[in-house]
Image (cartoon, grey):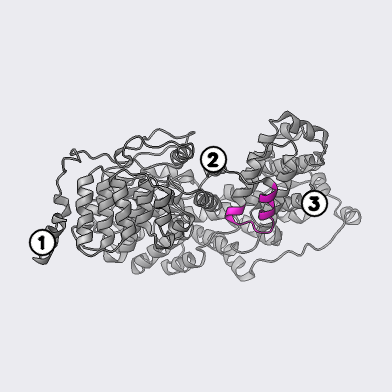
Amino acid sequence: MARRWSIASRRQQGEPVNLLSIAPTPDDGGQIAVNSPLDIDQAIDKALAVEDGEQPKTNPIIIAEPADQALDTLTEPQATESLATEPLATEPAETDLPAAANASQTAPNVGLGTNDVYASAKIGRRNISDVGLAAIGVGDTGNSQLDSLIWRGTSARDAVFLLQKSATASQSKAVTELAYEVVARQSVPPSGANNVAADLVEARLAFLANGGRSSDLALLAAQLPEAEKWADWRRWLTEHYLMIRDDVAACSIVSRQITQTMDPFWHKSNVICQAVQGKTGGARFAADILAANGVDDPIFFSLVDEVLNNNLATPADLAKLDPAKLDSAHIVLMDVANRPIPLEGLAVLPKQMAETVIKLKFLGSDARMVSTFDGLNRGLITHRQAGKLWRSAGQENNDPQLALAQLDGKGDALTTALAWRALDADTKTDRLARVAKGIKAEINGGNGAMMLPLYAELVRNALADEAVAANMRFDDLDVAPKMAFLLAINQPNDTTTLAAFAGNGEALMAAELLRGLSGDAVDANVISALNMWHILPVLEAAGVAVDEQDWLGLVKNAPVSGQGFAGLPPLLLKAVTAAAEARHVAETVLLANWLLHDVALEKTNPADLAAVIRALDMIGQGDVAKAFAHEIIAAHLMQRLAAMIPDGTQS
């Protein structure tokens, strides 16, 4: 208490307190042990260890996280030294924008999935002109079909308009992923960018934030100048770094800010920085300063005390915590203190934290399941990673029948995760009948494309049980055709597995149809047998050849009925095709993302979707065009799969 009075007296005398002058106390040992940023597989490793009951044997705040725990091949370079403390040597010239914007230090690569190639991105945060500001971005997104001139032909004001209008996920994962790459990548700015540079950057940040693309956002936010206009993003960046364990980057920002402001946010962050660096004396001293300055945050001070004293939370401690009063600083401290973060706690975090949240180690079971669903739905993690995270989210598994009853008609994050977990833990020989019911509920609930690979994994795992495999060979339960069809949509090239199912005729044809997209040809008899002539415009736009037919003969012998498809907005569709014809790459992509945002692919006029495929091909995005065509056909096949599975408990 005496120390608090001393600090308060200093404050009354007008003497500034410089926390950078805090010397290591004896209990600090003068040591600083920081954490390395985690990639997603390392985060999964740690989540699995927590669920298995592993507890840190020493104070968790002074143990450096190992950097070599990736489960498979996904790796990530380590963080560099403190970020962007040197000014750019010269102002970037308009003729050398990409090189100029890359003139400073290397940003820590905190991405996952396609973002792993961003390690070479350079950043600079001071003395950035309007033109240089507009040129910030990720150095290389890994898409070799995109270059630095993607904004050529589009004005900056039009770019801002398009970014604002298209800042939503479309019904196509392929198109949405391309849109995020276009927005994030470093490129020559659109014409007139110097007049609206701040608006352009704000629109790009908002676009990526809406998608939860935390890694891309961090790389852009680290390049922003240290002006008041970008203060909120500087705060967000600090929180992001702390949550992904990049303490060097976070505390570099904090150490500068605490000398310039008494804003409690920065001084709370300094307490956390002192703690995670092992400076327990410095952390207590910084916490005393906050208390002396009248900061009223009992949750924060309680968690700080818990971290510094290395106390594990008891059930009584957890009961005292009011989830409605949590903020981002509390979330960071709860993860450091090994406290399970509740689902309600995630609600206080902004959507731009979606990717960040997945790397938190101590999420409660419901929070882990919901954040995993969100990450999978946004394309931030793979299906393999989602399966591991869901399996790690607590030890209890619901009864499969009960879980399916809750899932039917809802399809929200928690019921989806609980149903999949229950089916994954089911060991009865008739479990594939319940898998069939589950995938039908997911398709009807709008999650079919996202969940199909995970349900295919359940089928493949179940086939390791010889009793289940025998049932599928002899079709004792009339489930084999449905499971074969599911696997055909998921992996059409795996004909060996498909051959082991009874009643696999339609499944083999579905697989052949999908393989035709990569082979550039498809047998007309397959289309006819599946009654899929309505997707002919999609096949033609994707460059898939169909043999000449006696079209009149087909009309005479095949049922012809209207499909009741919804058309895409004609004016917006025309804007997409016009932009593509003019080779305006970014403009075409953003318009396509906007165009596809609210109509399910299987309910959309295939002729309109074919126009989008051709537009993507015209701007050099042939791979994305093929992937989009595959999504369309798979969406129609999933509707056929759902129709094959009767309602009710029998499949």
Q: Is residue 80 above or below residue 441?
A: above
Q: Does the CB distance between marks 3 and 2 fall below 8 Å?
A: no
Give the class, few, some or many, for how many residues have Cα within 10 Å of label 2's Cα (few <14, many ≥20).
some
- Magenta-drawn segment: 401-415
Task: Name the quadrant containing residue 600.
Answer: bottom right
In the rendered image, residue 457, in percent from the top left (x then y), is placed at 64, 39
Q: Residue tagged by mark 1?
A: 10
| Disc 3 residue type (three-letter) | Pro
Residue appearing at x 35%, y 37% in the figure: 65
| Disc 2 residue type (three-letter) | Lys
Q: Residue tagged by mark 2?
A: 388
224 or 449: nearer the viewer: 449
Q: Earlier in the sequence, mark 1 or mark 3?
A: 1
From mark 1 to mark 2, how far is it between C-alphas?
A: 53 Å
Q: Is residue 29 left or right of residue 358?
A: left
The N terminus sits in image quarter: bottom left
Q: Residue furthest left?
A: 13
Looking at the rendered structure, the secondary structure element under dot 3 is loop
Q: Residue tagged by mark 3?
A: 646
Task: Name the quadrant containing residue 601.
Answer: bottom right
